[in-house]
Image: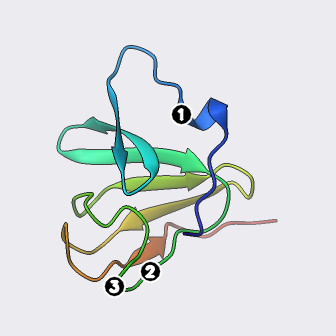
Amino acid sequence: MAIAQDSADKKSVGSISKDVGGVSVFSMGGVDFATGAGAPTTGASGDMKASPKGSLYIDATAGKPYIKTSASGASVTWVLVGTIES
């Protein structure tokens, strides 16, 4: 797993968090949201495999947002959102 979470990534305010393959997420509007450090892993055993298409993950260390483009349970694909300027 490429995603690493510390205690700040596992807190939720006014929402219910759940565990998706070892990653703490919260759901809103049919998608999951998570933060952590490191880019999410893709492939057959990728990060947040059970999360639905359209779920978002933020690599808070690098400041990079990723969107899940694969269906729940399928081989996982994540795409970096937008252009990040240094």
- Distance from label 1 to label 3 (Cα)? 25 Å
> Which residue is most to the front?
22
User: What residue type is disc 2 on?
Assistant: Thr
Q: Is residue 7 left or right of residue 81?
A: right
26 sits left or right of 70 in the view: right
Q: Which residue is mark 3?
A: 44
Query: Which residue is the site of mark 2?
Result: 42
Considering every residue shown, the one lying at the far top of the view is 14
Q: Is residue 31 above or below residue 62?
A: above
The residue wearing badge 1 is 10
Q: Name the element at disc 3.
A: loop
Name the spot of residue 6 as percent of width and height, x first.
Answer: 67, 40
Amino acid under disc 1: Lys
Q: CA distance from mark 2 to mark 3?
A: 7 Å
Residue 59, picture quadrant: bottom right
* Residues at marks 1 and 3 touching, judged by CB atoms closer than 8 Å: no
Residue placed at 64% from the left, 30% from the top? 8
Vertical placement of residue 32 versus 29, above or below: below
Label disc, if present, on residue 22 of the rendered structure: none
In the rendered image, which quarter contains the C terminus? bottom right
**Protein image colouring:** rainbow
